Amino acid sequence: MKKRIITPIVAAIIVVLSPAVLLFAEGSQPRFLLTSDADILAQIPPPPADDSPAGMADIETLLQVQQYRTPAEIARAERVSSQDIMSPGALVFGPEFNAQNLPRTAAVLQQAYDEHRPAVLASKKQWGRARPYNRGLGITPCVEIVPLDESYPSGHSAESALLAALYGKALPEYETVFMENVRETLWGRIIAGVHFPTDTQAGRLIGSVIAREMLKNQHTIGALDEMRAEILSFIKQPDAATTAAVRSAAATAAQLARRPLTRAARLHSHNDYKQQRPFYLAYSQMADTIEADIYSTPVPGELRVAHDKDELPSAPTLDETYIRPLVEVYKQNGGRPWKDSEKQLVLMVDFKTPDTGTLGRLAAKLKQHPDVFDTNVNPRAVRVVITNSDPLAGHFGDYPGLLSFDGSRADYTPAQLEHIHMISYRFRKLSHWTGKGRMSDEARARLVKAIDDAHALGKPVRFWGAPDSETAWEFLLKLGVDYINTDQPESCAAWLRK
């Protein structure tokens, strides 16, 4: 590896601040970082020359971003600019995640931040790269706080990478969303016009190097164990738990969305409440439709989610399993199911108790959140579809307008079709194929006719109770099915992108 030159000033800083000398942090706390700043700096490449391809790309990227950045992107950059050590946690667990409520967590993160800064500052002095807006390039920052120090590496990016690694180590179940925030931070500093792209990449690199070195130290691991215990106690609060679960699922969905679909089908999470993580797993896989069976109970207004009546005593409520998470989803994503997608989300509900009482309770709950469940108020709202409960002819209009129906036949009138969202057929009425071997020509013809009948009505079609395997999914898709009915949303989502 090419030897890097360290200036006398930087060498002096490193000697004075070297963690090899300072084995204890201020207040006699054992240090997390025992690696010298010189060893850390040796792993960071120099910034590109302005006339190099990377240097020219740096400049052109900022000029293009500045020309086309929107008010929403400027607000995004300002949010990144104002982040602190508690921000990644607050992003996941909600605004009550702060130093006052989590003092041990704040102390651990503050110590890590304080220990990482000397290496970052030394690296800035080492390379002395001027900020983009101090280069005569016509670049103007769009954030309120404009840094005065050197540009390379990005301090915000280093801090974000460090914190993501520590949060992720303490809470591996939420690592995906913490790492997603690193990407947001890097891009936010570019949008702000305060860093070149290579500044942010170098910042992420030095932050990751420092985190890796800290995590070699058992004092760090012990402190993160204490941090985890405090956070887990905090997120027992229902609101914090819901916020965290939605953030984590959304981060997984964002990663999935970057992989293009290779098969034109929609995903229906059948009996979703039976999943280990009801709602969240299907949502993280960007399922188009999520299905729940509901029961009215003797408790006024209560609806519980279960398949069989004997499950009710321990069954979760519709509010905690679906309504509360969906309200949080729309709150986080600005009134849509997924932040960067135009997809619509369908919540399919199967009444297991008489329609009248169950319907009234469901409608009352939905009407409390019209921006989430009423497409007349918000075109991107969740479409709530009632399945297995076709109204009698002439009575479709008796149901609240925010509800649609899952049809089961091909003889609806034009007026009735306005209330039908999709057509679903029981697979076993048309075929006894198990997904293995060859389907009979007669059964295949029945399936094709059912699909054609639904499409003639202008409605998408689904078969429930069909074999649930890649072979069956592929076969049904080739026949023209629109929705893949599955109890395996994660596997099906991967197959759709394979």
Image (cartoon, rainbow, N blue to C red):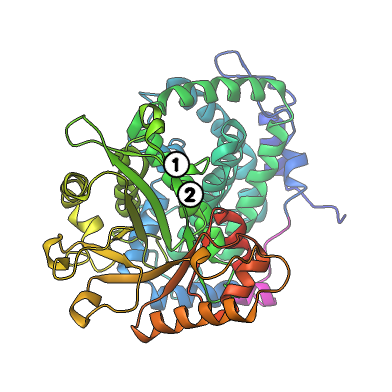
Secondary structure, mark 2, is helix
Whether residue 343 is visible? yes
Which residue is at a point 21% across and 29% down the rendered structure image?
299
Q: Residue 6 location, x and y as percent?
A: 75, 48
The answer to whether mark 1 and mark 2 are in CB contact below 8 A is yes
For the residues marked 1 and 2, what is the alpha-carbon distance in whole angstroms?
6 Å
x and y percentages locating residue 86 in the rendered image: 43, 35
Q: Residues within 10 Å of mark 1 (few under 14, many from 20)?
A: many
Q: What amino acid does circle 2 point to?
A: Ala
Classify mark 1: helix, strand or loop: helix
Q: Main secondary structure of the magenta part?
A: loop
Query: Which kind of residue does numbered mark 1 sit on?
Result: Ala
The quarter of the image holding the C terminus is bottom right
Report the residue at 43% width, 21% height from top: 103
Relative height, residue 45 to residue 13 (above, below): below
Query: Any magenta on residue 16?
Result: no
Query: Residue 77 appears at what percent x and percent y?
Result: 40, 58
Magenta part of the protein: which range? 45-57
Which residue bears the numbered disc 1? 245
Which picture quadrant has residue 361? top left
Q: Which residue is mark 2?
A: 249
Which residue is more in the foreground, 320 or 390? 390
Q: Nearer the viewer, residue 438 or 313?
A: 438
In the image, residue 55 lies in the stretch drawn in magenta: yes
